[in-house]
Image: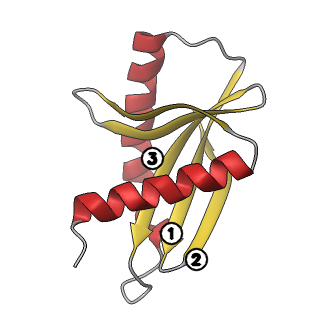
Amino acid sequence: METTISSGATAESQAVDLLVRRGYRIVERNYRCTIGELDIVARDRGVLVFVEVRSRANSEHGHALEMVGRRKQRKVTRVAQSYLAWRRPLFDEARFDVVAITGSEIVLVQDAWRL
């Protein structure tokens, strides 16, 4: 049986593969600070994108997308603000995308919320 850490790493790798196929350029993975972690930071053309990855083995307890509620969005937003202050990337626009993996289904929600 896969551990939570290894299943999370597998899900993030699947998300990176999907994003690269869609034309995203991966800037950074697993940015950590005292507030929390950003799974993936990428560029989609001129837009800086913070990507939250969620996964569930199956839909028995709901879809992975349901795991990104307002509370999670607020936390990821705070970590993204820390990232912007620390890394100081150049960008005109920023957004948050979600990659939700439920079983073998992978869903990309672009522009799930804004900074």
Q: What amino acid is labelled 2 in the image?
A: Glu
The residue depicted at 60 percent of the width and 34 percent of the height is 42
Contact check, label 2 and label 1, Cβ < 8 Å: yes
Viewer-nearest residue: 93 or 14: 14
- Residue 13: x, y in percent? 48, 54
Per the image, the residue denoted by label 1 is: 101
Q: Earlier in the sequence, mark 3 or mark 1?
A: 3
Q: Eyeballing the image, is 63 above or below 49? A: below
Q: CA distance from mark 3 to mark 1?
A: 17 Å
- Residue 38: x, y in percent? 40, 38
Q: Eyeballing the image, is 104 above or below 115? A: below
Q: Which type of secondary structure does the marked residue at label 1 adopt? A: strand
Q: CA distance from mark 2 to mark 1?
A: 6 Å
- Residue 84: x, y in percent? 48, 17
Colouring scheme applied when the structure was drawn: secondary structure
Per the image, the residue denoted by label 3 is: 73
